[in-house]
């Protein structure tokens, strides 16, 4: 949890044009160790504190935090010191170690040896995967929800090129970062969209669920109104805080789900950097919005098993693949897969069969499979994502959601048992319709239904529909999961 307090936080906030002078008192009071009662005994076991900013006030700030730091250590709460880029790193690390902090978080990469672990605290493209790390703090994400509905569901008015609501989610980037750094824990660093306006508690619960459903953790950050009300132990504020903690606790109890692996029919292949960054990332983003499960495949981490179990592969990059990768992709197509490429592919293999999607793709027979070649370089990622879903075809779906246009899904299976898990995140901001149902292409007769507001699961009975099983879900708010029985 981000714990903004003290001189450095006040100075940082004062640099912003919209700083509310009334918040000064709140930032000072959050240094009070008595406020740790909010988190002691809760699933929040780590606080992120402002620690060094390269200012003359650094030493004073750190000295004033001593009582809070001591109280955290006595309560077995870990502390991470947030360090701004232009600081004397050695001095900041020494002071943090001496005070008893567990780690430092900073945007820039430090090559010198540190007395404490360093957590990268930056946007994805600036993370160096050459350094040893257990945690990455990922900034520059989006506040999850239907754009404009953070304060009131009635505010939501934005949609995409279709009537469906325009959902903002971090699911795609979490999957990308987890592929870039296997085994690394991902912390989503997201501040409320408006610090000067109170958010609905559902918006906070959604921030928890949007990260956790895809295997990450949100670094809890509260708006100023809620933070001020918590000092006063206001009934509404305490109710919201308890609901946030219940949501975190739910995912803490189900940490084993983080070990499940994504199941999909489509693999998206790219290096996700440079000239390829925009299109490749937007394809992931829009596939996530379209409820199309995918597997992120980095060219730099390519193995012989990268395409195992997939029905289709999309090669996104503007540069042609190297010889070895090209041969592996061709073998995938020849063995029955669908290979989707752009003009950058170069010489086209296979036998031409027909044009598809209003002539945007040429389809070639490639052994037992097909090669789909875009006639032009795609410019609109929205159209590309839609075309890819049409080319892959709904008949290859592993999972379908009905009456859930404002939802994203995470579909995964347990490594050892193969047990399937569907996690649904509802961004609409109100209770879901009673008509939501999930279809799964698995011979599963029953499943456990989990909701955030319940400590126990209910059992659902499925009915056979179209070579799969359909489950009708009870009404739920923000999040629910359907876990195959037998786990």
Image (cartoon, rainbow, N blue to C red):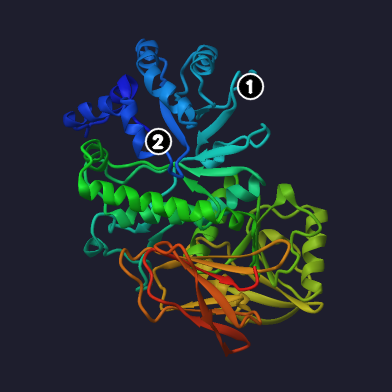
Residue 48 is left or right of residue 287, and the answer is left
Circle 2: element type: loop
Residue 276 visible in the picture: no
Measuring 58% from the left and 38% from the top, which residue is drawn there? Answer: 135
The quadrant the N terminus occupies is top left
Give percent across and percent down for residue 333: 77, 71
Residue that sits furthest to the left in the current view: 22
Which mark, by number, is residue 2?
A: 2
Q: Nearer the viewer, residue 279 or 378?
A: 279
Measuring 27% from the left and 38% from the top, which residue is drawn there? Answer: 227
Give percent across and percent down for residue 428: 34, 66
Residue 445 visible in the picture: yes
Which mark, by number, is residue 412?
A: none
Give percent across and percent down for residue 337: 74, 73
Give percent across and percent down for residue 436: 42, 78
Circle 1: element type: loop
Gap between marks 2 and 1, in whole Å? 26 Å
Residue 254 is left or right of residue 406, and the answer is right
Q: Is 466 situated above or below 228?
A: below
Image quarter of residue 257: bottom right
Other-residue count near label 2 (Cα within 10 Å), few / some / many at <14 / 14–19 / ≥20? some
* Label located before the other in sequence (2 or 1): 2
Q: Is 171 situated above or below 461?
A: above
Frontmost of labels 2 and 1 is 2
Q: Nearer the viewer, residue 320 or 6?
A: 6
Measuring 54% from the left and 42% from the top, which residue is drawn there? Answer: 124
Return the residue at label 1: 111
Q: Nearer the viewer, residue 72 or 388?
A: 72
Q: Nearer the viewer, residue 257 or 381?
A: 257
Other-residue count near label 1 (Cα within 10 Å), few / some / many at <14 / 14–19 / ≥20? few
């Amino acid at each position: 949890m981000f714990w903004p307090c003290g001189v450095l936080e006040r100075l940082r906030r004062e640099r912003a044009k919209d700083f509310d002078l009334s918040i000064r008192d709140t930032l000072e009071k959050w240094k009070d160790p008595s406020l740790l009662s909010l988190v002691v005994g809760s699933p929040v076991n780590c606080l992120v504190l402002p620690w060094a900013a390269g200012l003359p006030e650094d030493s004073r700030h750190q000295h004033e935090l001593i009582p809070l730091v001591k109280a955290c250590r006595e309560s077995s709460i870990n502390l991470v010191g947030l360090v701004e880029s232009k600081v004397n790193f050695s001095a900041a690390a020494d002071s943090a170690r001496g005070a008893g902090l567990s780690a430092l978080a900073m945007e820039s990469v430090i090559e010198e040896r540190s007395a404490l672990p360093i957590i990268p605290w930056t946007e994805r493209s600036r993370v160096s995967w050459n350094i040893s790390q257990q945690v990455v703090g990922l900034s520059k994400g989006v506040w999850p929800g239907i754009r404009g509905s953070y304060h009131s569901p009635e505010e939501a008015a934005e949609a995409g090129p279709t009537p469906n609501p325009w959902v903002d989610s971090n699911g795609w980037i979490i999957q990308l970062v987890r592929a870039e750094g296997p085994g690394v824990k991902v912390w989503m660093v997201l501040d409320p969209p408006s610090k000067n306006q109170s958010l609905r508690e559902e918006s906070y619960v959604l921030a928890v669920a949007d990260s956790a459903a895809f295997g990450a953790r949100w670094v809890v950050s509260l708006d100023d109104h809620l933070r001020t009300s918590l000092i006063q132990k206001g009934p509404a504020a305490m109710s919201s805080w308890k609901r946030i903690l219940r949501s975190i606790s739910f995912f803490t109890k189900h940490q084993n789900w983080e070990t499940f692996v994504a199941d999909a029919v489509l693999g998206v292949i790219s290096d996700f950097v440079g000239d390829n960054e925009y299109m490749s990332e937007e394809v992931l983003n829009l596939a996530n919005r379209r409820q199309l499960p995918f597997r992120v495949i980095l060219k730099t981490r390519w193995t012989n098993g990268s395409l195992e179990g997939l029905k289709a592969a999309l090669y996104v990059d503007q540069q042609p693949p190297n010889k070895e990768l090209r041969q592996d992709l061709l073998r995938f197509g020849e063995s029955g897969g669908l290979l989707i490429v752009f003009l950058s592919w170069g010489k086209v293999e296979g036998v031409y069969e027909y044009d598809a999607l209003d002539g945007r793709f040429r389809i070639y027979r490639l052994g037992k499979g097909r090669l789909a070649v875009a006639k032009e370089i795609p410019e609109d990622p929205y159209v590309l994502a839609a075309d890819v879903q049409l080319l892959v075809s709904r008949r290859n779906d592993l999972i379908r959601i009905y009456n859930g246009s404002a939802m994203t899904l995470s579909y995964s299976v347990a490594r050892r048992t193969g047990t399937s898990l569907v996690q649904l995140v509802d961004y609409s901001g109100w209770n879901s319709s009673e008509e939501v149902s999930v279809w799964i292409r698995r011979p599963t007769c029953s499943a456990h239904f989990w909701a955030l507001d319940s400590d126990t699961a209910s059992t659902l009975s499925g009915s056979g529909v179209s070579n799969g099983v359909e489950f009708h879900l009870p009404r739920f708010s923000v999040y629910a999961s359907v876990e195959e029985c037998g786990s």
